[in-house]
Image (cartoon, coloured by chain):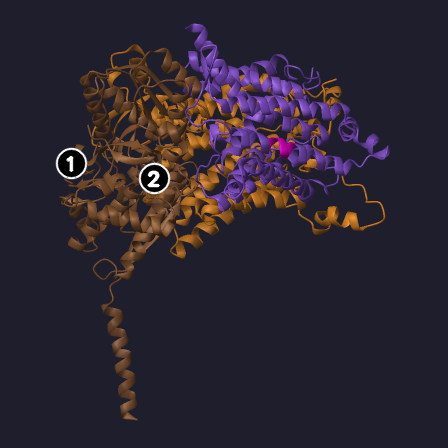
Amino acid sequence: MRSARWFQVALFMAAAVAVELAAVYAGKAFLLTQLTMSAYYTLVVIGLSLLMGYAGQISIGHAGFFAIGGYAAAALTTWDLSGRRGGWLVSALGAAGALVSRPDLYGGTVLVVRPWVAFGVAVLLALVIAFAVGIPVLRLKGHYLAMATLGIGTIVYSIALGTGALGAADGISGVPPFPLLGGLQVGGAASIRVANYYIAFGLLALGMLLLLNLVNSRVGRALRAIHGAEEAASAMGVDTARFKLQTFVLSAVLAAVAGVFLTHFNGGVGPSEASIMKSVKYVAIVAVGGMGSLWGTLTTSLVLNFLSLRGYFGTFDDAVFGLILIAVMLFAPSGILALSFRRSLEPVLGRLRTAPKPATREGEAGDPDSMPYRLEEKPSEDGR
Amino acid sequence: MLGELLLQYLVAGLTYGTIYAVVGMGFNIIYNATGIINFAQGEFVMLGGMTAVSLHQVLPLPLAILGAVAVTMAIGALIEMAFIRWLAAPSVLRMIIITIGVSIVVREAALLVWGQQVRALPYFTGNEVTSISMGGARVSPQVLWAVGTTALMVALVTAFFRWASWGRQMRACASNRVAASLCGLPTRNLVTLAFVLSAGMGALAGCVVSPITYTQYGIGTGLAIKGFTVAILGGLGNSLASVAAGLVFGILESFSVSVLPTAYKDVVTIAVLLAILFVRPSGLFGAREASRP
Amino acid sequence: MRKKILAIAATLLAGWATQALAKEPIKVGALLAVSGPASFLGAPEARTLEMMVADLNAKGGIDGHPVTMIIKDTGASPEKAISFAKQLIEEDKVLAIIGPSTSGETMAIKNLAEEAKTILLSCAAAEVIVNPVAKWVFKTPQKDSYAVVKIFQQMKKMGISKIGVLSSNTGFGKAGKEQIEKLAPEHGIQIAVNEVYDKAATDLTAEVTKVKAANVQAIVNWSIEPAQSIVIKNVRQLGLQFPIFQSHGFGNIQYVKAAGAAAEGVIFPAGRLLIADSLPASHPQKALLVAYAKEYAAKFKEDASTFGGHAYDALIILEAAVKKAGTDKEKVRTAIENIKGLPGTGGIFSFSATDHNGLDLDSFAMITVKDGRFVPLDR
């Protein structure tokens, strides 16, 4: 089984290499830019897919974690500390080698935090916030959980939009490239475009490997048990709260990492990355790709994001997205990859048939109809 | 002077609050009938306002409003019949995502039809600068129209559910759909009725606040989020509670402006909401089943 | 037979010659927020460009070069602006980019344009776009600081010294707020209340109440979206009779219509497009302003606004530079910097190596609203 996973990831990387070579050979190397950006957004989405598909927790605020990562990296690598050289904090950081002087766009020099340190801080921040938020939030269920995650996303967005130090409405721009190991840099310059493509897809492949391993491990089985029947799992001794929290935190960290890298690639970040519409789009992509299907989600995300960033649909970007959403949810609720004509026509054929419909298969990972949000007994109109 | 100010903030809060209350109530009606959170709820408000403005060019104001409400109700019914009705036992999450898709498509269609321009109905009485003095605070007459219309709607809808035959059938359907169906109630049509009712309320609210807040193709999304928040705050499923919660929410927003920079208005209100959810997860007035032990 | 071959050869030769003589098209890109939250900026800008390019090409283009305008709708999203900018620069290999419509997007691609050595003519207003000056980046809207100075000068004439300031949480609002805060002390203005509201706000009574409580002599509102009409309505509804000052974002008659009676007497600085008819015939801008307003209104059935004018200015600046310097990017860039005294909708442009905006204090006229129409403020 394990070799199957490695094989899948290897196949994926081979496909990525093939695409890159084809693009460069055809003289369309510029396509790599949008592919790189899509890869980073996809990293967010696969983490969310794990959370929604396996742990069964909805999060309509995940763009917030992306923004936390992006803004932390952007702020730390652009806030000029040279005015505070005498202060104790700056001296301590300087002594610890956490700071670096670099030229800015206009020929001056600024003293900022090293990108690696900023990256560490960003991830740590996302981790801590995810923990702090996850513990109370994951006790809620269904619509209340959705609302709480929506609320978290809104708070992050409002803070990003309302705080002067974070650039308020303009966001932060002028973010320097992020030097990785060797001569590799995460940045937007055309000269390092191919390298950045591989960094992005490499990161994505690593993420997939991590999640695939997780899903097929003890943790993954525990998650599926929780997803299928939470009380039963709990009765069997599965620590449901702990596993849900871990999944939540992991998906948050993945989102933050994607945020850091994309911010360095774009050279900036803005409040639009934290908006609720972005979060909703992430959720929608997971739904379209198939909630428990990591590969389905990955493919859907790469394709949709790429087309959107290329401006393929022009002004109708959102409309097309909405239509795809409706179509998939109506006809292929288990996601695009699980599409089978017979099942998708079931609802229509069912009305024409006179014989009773066969029972639908329950408990498949990725089938939203078997998710724990069943039609609950609701209180009646006047609250009694 | 302080009293005047407080009253002014209160009035401002009521203005926002009535809008939220109506959207929240619309959410609850559909939720009760189907278990679905209809994210397209905000679009009904937008459609009501936009259609009324268009109709007003050829009809007098009261007819334009009636026409807009009728058209929006028809659209609500269409949405239900096209997307909701023929799905067999769909999961709630799937429905949420479908309604999100519907709201996006409706919004983009509105952009196509009406463009990105901002429109507004004329004030029902008075104009943009008239205001009435009430106890030191100044209120635009349109605000009174909005509050009054909302109160009327709430009363009518509550009466409908309590005493009208269809209303009671809808309550039965909400309480236990299978049993209701076994009793011979036309559950499918009742669901359509829920959408129609919800759409009509939203449209009327959209018309009556249009002079104050303007209508534009994109206002639906924000309203849906606020309405959802308010419905949760009151306790999902409880219509009257969502009205109260809407007013509370609006007043909270308004008063938060007086102490904190306006930029953080949302942070305050959401933080309060989250605090309430963590302590009392079923909302202010809801049943106690929303969280696990 | 010989005649036939000769005829065919002649036709082919003529065809080939015409091809060779026809100049290659000039590609210009535009990144505009045609849909989305800044559509009141991007939509008029896009329409203006389409209209102008059609006119230009009907006359044979710029110096015989037909103009190809590639307009991309960014929806005011910086990520899309970055992605499309890269496309325009690398794939379409444009000579220059007009736009973006908002300051946030412009700042996101400022470095990009500079590194790629592509001319950027921004339609966004923030000061930071041209200060510090980047070699390849220009902007056409007037400086916010001049708008603020004009307002303060007017306030001095009216004896106002204590004000309340409301601004929206967009890049435009933030830029204006910063300038107001910076310039208030030297003009003797005291800011008693300073509030930022959400751009999508639908009722601002609470914020205005806060201003009322501070007993100010006037209120300044700095925003560019429909909320600016709502603010002035709320001010009058609360019974406040003092003067209301708006930013140059008020430069669109639909905001006046939306605010109805509340717009009467509002004072704001703006380009002279809005009062083109009242300009003396000798004014250098009058002819082009009247022509632009007329053509735009006839073609699109709505009044021209100053926002569309920013795109107009960007294109005529580019046109003037190309006429002088040909199609080489570096030469065109230098030519832009050498433009002096070019009349546009925003004012009269004179660039230099240190001034990439080209407009001065006089580019603004003080305008007020009377009977629902824009008239010059004659005080």
Quadrant location, the C terminus of chain B: top right
Q: Residue at x 50, y 17 (%)?
A: B13
Q: Which residue is drawn at 48% across and 43% down?
A: B114
Q: Give the range drawn in magenta.
A: B198-202
Determine whether, in the image, residue B22 is placed left or right of residue C270. right
Determine whether, in the image, residue A354 is placed left or right of residue A122. right
Q: Please give the chain letter of the residue carrying mark 2.
A: C
Q: How crowded is mark 2: few (under 14 residues within 10 Å), some or many (20 or more)?
A: many
Tell me the number on the disc at residue C101.
Answer: 2
Q: Give the answer, above or below, for where A153 lies relative to C122.
A: above
* Chain colored orange: A
Question: Marks 1 and 2: same chain?
Answer: yes
A62 or A315: nearer the eye? A315
In front: label 1 or label 2: 2
Residue underneath mark 1: C354
The tint chain C carries is: brown
Which residue is farthest bottom? C1
For the residue labelled by badge 2, is the local secondary structure a helix, a strand or a loop? Answer: loop
